[in-house]
Amino acid sequence: MTQTGTEIFADRMLSLGLARVSEAAAIASARLIGRGDERAADRAAVDAMRLQLNLLDIRGIVVIGEGERDEAPMLFIGESVGRGIGPEVDIALDPLEGTTLTAKDMPNALSVIAMGPRGSILHAPDVYMDKLSIGPGFPPGLLSLDMTPAERVRALAKAKKCPPEAVSVCILERERHREMIAEVRSTGAAIRLITDGDVAGVIHTAEASRTGIDMYMGQGGAPEGVLAAAALRCMGGQIQGRLVFRNDDERARAARLGITDLDRIYMLDDMIAGDVIFSATGVTDGSVLSGARRDGDYLETETLLMRSKTGSVRRLHYRQKNL
């Protein structure tokens, strides 16, 4: 447990409640899998997640959420959640990480949430982040965002004592990554291209023997980078992130959060500075979690629930009457 304000951050006691939060969001959005309506699926997940969060004995502040107040009616950055009693906590969340994946019934849509003591989770602006992650078991500083993509592949291959052809890299399939993809392929490494869901993409690296992914690289959302860092804090691994600003409005967002060094490389400890609990529930089937599915009159989900303090990783199967 961690002291926070006048209360104790009882991560063990709060962890099951956090699992209920991601389960509720996943169940709500799962009813809209394949329906082609991204907004409806996201709204259902947000409503369900907020309802469950407000049942917890916490004084929570959303530091990674659906956007700024003028962009999101609920679970916006800075919103207070919980019953207003208990420990002061930071909350990072994405009620539906993969709205397009859900709408199109594609793999790896998740409901994701992380919680830590107040001041422990980076308040990242809603901009892009250049990310690089690998799993556990490698020396610190093995890779760097300042390396070229090819240098990263070769350095990891050397550490793994294998040829570059045996390395597999996960990258978001975007036009901005066209040159990166070509350079990685020039080394002989394999690439798994994903259309969305880069929280799951980073988590893949922490379980390389299960997922077949050794490294994640490329630009995605900064909030998702912080959520992924929370997962790696629990599972082990390394992540680096550098914010990417496309215009003055995005730089102003960073300034409002007190960010002055716009070129800083954030390491895992910078993004998650203390003990954290993390919960992700599958919405659609993926390589990390099974998706929500109907079994007769019941709906079933699978949740990954983790605590960084103990390194515990639980896979929870939940079954409820399909109302």
Image (tube, helix red, strand yellow):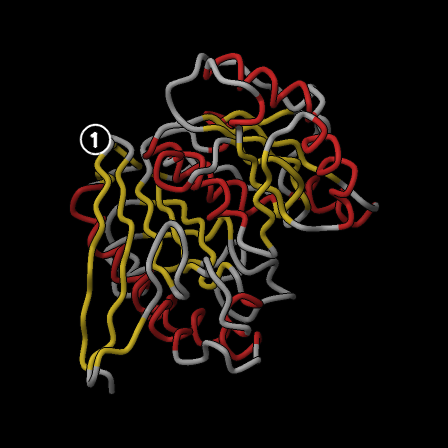
Check disc 1 and give the amino acid type. Answer: Thr
- Which residue is found at the position 60% from the left and 30% from the top? 189
Element marked by disc 1: loop
Taking depth in this image into account, of 51 and 301 the one nearest to the observer is: 301
70 sits to left or right of 61: right
- Which residue is found at the position 36% from the left and 34% from the top? 209
Taking depth in this image into account, of 263 and 196 the one nearest to the observer is: 196
- Which residue is found at the position 70% from the left and 39% from the top? 255
* Callout count: 1
Residue 310 in the image: above or below residue 293: above
269 sits to left or right of 233: right
Taking depth in this image into account, of 48 and 156 the one nearest to the observer is: 156
- Which residue is found at the position 41% from the left and 56% from the top? 286
Residue 2 in the image: above or below residue 39: above
Question: Badge 1: how crowded within 10 Å, few (<14), some, or many (20+)?
Answer: few
Q: Quadrant of the N terminus?
A: top left
121 sits to left or right of 86: right
Q: Quadrant of residue 110?
A: bottom left
Q: Quadrant of residue 322?
A: bottom left
> x%, y% of residue 155?
58, 15
> x%, y% of residue 66?
55, 60
Residue wearing tag 1:
310
Q: Quadrant of residue 285?
A: bottom left
> Which residue extends farthest right?
247
Q: Quadrant of the C terminus?
A: bottom left
129 sits to left or right of 104: right
